[in-house]
Every structure is written in C-alpha cells, then in structure tokens.
Amino acid sequence: MNLLGKILVVLVTLLAIGFLAVAITVFTTHKNWHAEIVGQNTQIATLNAQLERLKSDYKQTEGNLELELESAENQVVKLENERVALAQRNEQAQAQIDELAQQRRDLTTAVAQVQAINQRLGEENQQLQQTIASTLQATDAAFNETVKSTSELHEAKVMLESQLERNAQLVEQVGGKQ
C-alpha cells in the first residue's frame, strides 16, 4: 500500500495544485458583480433620465412644430391676402396705365392738331408780314411823296411870300416914284 498511498499523495498534490491554479484563475478573472450591478443601475438611471429628457425634448419640439405649423398656416393666409391685394393693385395700376395710354394718344392727336394749326397760323403770319411789309413800303412811299409835296408846297409858299413881298416893294417903289 505504500505505493498506492504515494500515488494518491502525488495525485492529491497535483489535484490540489490544479485546483489552486483554477482558484487563482477564477480569483483573478472574477468580477465584482455588486460593483457591476451598481454601475449598470447607474447607467440605467442615466439612460432613464436621458430618455425622460429626450421625451420632454420631443414633446417640446412637437409643441414648437405645431406652433410653427400654425404660424406657417397664418403666414400662408397672410401671404394669400397680400397676393390678392397685390393683384388688385396690379389691376388698378394696369387700368391707370391704360387710361394714361389713352390720354397720351388723345394728347398726341391734340398736339398734331395744334401743330397743324400752328403751321397754318405760321403761314398766315408770313402772309400778313408780307402784306404789312408791302403796306409799310407803300405807306413809306406815300409818306415820302407827302413830305416831298409838303416840302415843295412850303417852298412854293416861301417863294410866293417872297414874291409878294418883292411885289409889294416894287409897288411901293413904283408908287413912290410916281
């Protein structure tokens, strides 16, 4: 039994060393499950807080989106009203443009008529100026003739007076000698 005892002692020693190695391996690779649970619980709490924050952000964003949608709808209504007002103003402006175009055509016609009248009056003015010029020439000629005749008459009068005076002197001389 001695051999069998030795084999068992060596076998038990080897098994003890094997179990020791397994125990060391288990101990070195062993996780602290309590710390792991605490870490996981902390992570779960963080994720839950983040989930609640995201839900709150989602609700706030959804509320903002609804407000923006309502604001956009209001802006669409406002822009539609502005479009209608602009269309009306455009129609009014077009009516004014049409009216101004008609006035321009009327004024163009009136200007053409005035130009024709001015042309006719210009021709009549030239004829009148020619008539006035010829009348002035005739008047100047008649005036010159009158001046000449008056001058001749005056000379004749002066001559007559001088002859009468001379005649009176001669009559006196002849009457005084007799």
Image (cartoon, helix red, strand yellow):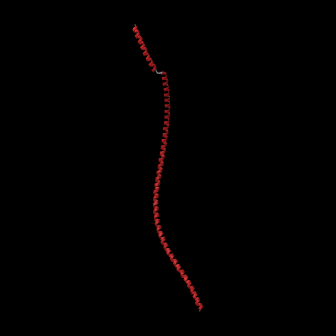
The residue located at (47%, 50%) in the rendering is 93
Residue 27: x and y in percent read: 46, 19
Q: Residue furthest right?
A: 176
User: Left or right of 5: which side holds 176?
Assistant: right
Q: Nearer the viewer, residue 128 or 154?
A: 154
The residue located at (50%, 74%) in the rendering is 140
Query: From the image, which quarter does the C terminus lie in?
Result: bottom right
Q: Is residue 44 above or below residue 1?
A: below
Residue 20: x and y in percent read: 44, 16
Residue 30: x and y in percent read: 46, 20
Residue 150: x and y in percent read: 53, 78
The residue located at (47%, 68%) in the rendering is 126
Number of marks present in the image shown: 0
Q: Residue furthest top?
A: 1
Image quarter for residue 2?
Answer: top left
Q: Residue furthest bottom?
A: 178
Image quarter for residue 23?
Answer: top left
Query: From the image, which quarter does the N terminus lie in?
Result: top left
Q: Nearer the viewer, residue 67 or 155?
A: 155
